[in-house]
Amino acid sequence: MTSPAEQDSRFSSAVYGARIARAAELARSAGLDGLVVTPGPDLRYLTGSRADSFERLTALVIAADTAKASVVLPRLELASLKESAVGDLGLTVLDWVDGVDPYAIVAAQLPTGAKVAVTDAMPALHLIPLADTLGALPILATGVLRELRMVKDDAEIEALRRAGAAIDRVHARMAEFLIVGRTEAEVGEAISEAILEEGHTEAAFVIVGSGPHGADPHHEVSDRVIESGDVVVIDIGGPVEPGYNSDSTRTYSMGQPSAEVSAQFAVLEAAQQAAVDSVRPGVSAESVDVAAREVLAAQGLAEVFVHRTGHGIGLSVHEEPYIVEGNTIELVEGMAFSIEPGIYFRGSWGARIEDIVVVTADGCESFNNRPHGLTVLG
């Protein structure tokens, strides 16, 4: 197992150079003159930078017509570029000090009257003065950057594959953590430690939904003591270097489940498999949602499936494409997303099965390979 410290903190500079060039190309196609990207997942995607957003502006400015890129940042934040590909790519670095107008520096990198798009992570603190300087309100760059980030390249797919294997190793150890008599919080703390031990840089989220808490899809942990007979939903994940996330849910039973629970869980398992089997290039995102939902509906469980079937994943745990009714986007090779139908009986119990998959030339590859059935512990 490779430790987080031994993993590369970013991809090769060539990867980021190609992404910036592609972003400029897509911006031109969208009729834009430039992109302004402040710290967040989009900046990390384009440069490998982990810079934070503060009251002083840091921004990547990409001129669409030339693909020339500049980084505008406070002089006191220059050290934040060391982990990024900015230096290797030879990007122009325009540092500024207090008293200088950074928005004017940004504007100077773009044509007069430029039509500009900004990342959706840009704070209003920076958006409003930038708009004043440009003389027009920028639009969101979501459409341009979404097209880039939705389709993963080989380096990203390998990172997601490692993340999936790492979280599978945590689920494989669940008998160590999930024990009758412990509280959800105690189990969650042990799982968080294991997430780090198995190769993640942090535990991004830990859901331990025991008994009636399993009927709340976004329950986290509580002081509830886990009891014999409980059905327990464990939804966990976190990033591995260089920042790509795992997200996997399995459901456990503390002792043998009732015949009713077993039967309803078997329907859920079939629904999740039907959704996985439906994935291939050219089908719509919503069709994958329909595949899971139809299996549940046929057994009278449609009303207890209360959320979308999945979400994209990468540098963000939740990103596009969303696997939900109404999303008619066609799946293409390289898109990565979760498939996670669930059933929730309020006040009683719940269950969810979640894998991360990537679209391949003729179907999909799952990054999670732990058994899908209701695992009996205790």
Image (cartoon, rainbow, N blue to C red):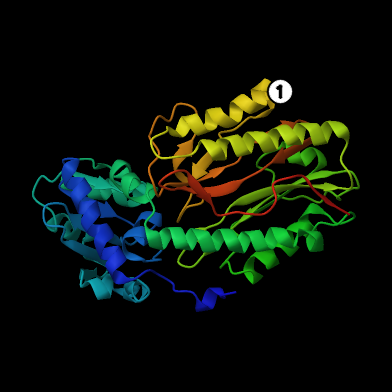
Quarter that holds the N terminus: bottom right
Which residue is rendered at x = 36% and y = 50% of the image?
149
The residue at the point 42 percent across, 59 percent down is 156
Measured from the top left, where is residue 77 in percent x and y? 34, 72
Q: Is 156 placed left or right of 119 in the picture?
A: right
Q: Residues within 10 Å of mark 1 (few under 14, many from 20)?
A: few
Front in this rendered view, residue 17 or 300: 300
Can residue 54 be seen here? The reply is: no
Residue at the spot 55% in from the left edge and 38% down from the top edge: 277
Relative placement, left or right, of 267 versus 325 is right
Residue at label 1?
A: 299
Instruction: Give 67 or 327, whichever is nearer the viewer.
Output: 327
Point 81% across, 60% down: residue:
175
- Of the residues shown, which amino acid type is indicated by label 1? Gln
Left or right: where 323 falls relative to 47: right
Q: Specify the farthest residue to the left.
A: 112
* Location of residue 137 in the rendering, given as x and y in whole percent from the top left corner: 23, 40
Whole-percent x, y for residue 3 in the image:
57, 75
Residue 370's image quarter?
Answer: bottom right
Q: Tally the numbered discs.
A: 1
Taking the image as drawn, is residue 68 in sight? yes
Instruction: Give the vertical position of 240 relative to 378 (above or below).
Output: below
Q: Quadrant of residue 37?
A: bottom left
Rendering coords of residue 255 (x, y %): 89, 47
- Location of the C terminus by quadrant is bottom right
Q: Is residue 41 left or right of residue 202?
A: left
Label 1 secondary element = loop
Residue farthest toward the front in the current orientation of the protein: 362
Depth check: give the residue in front, 319 or 328: 328
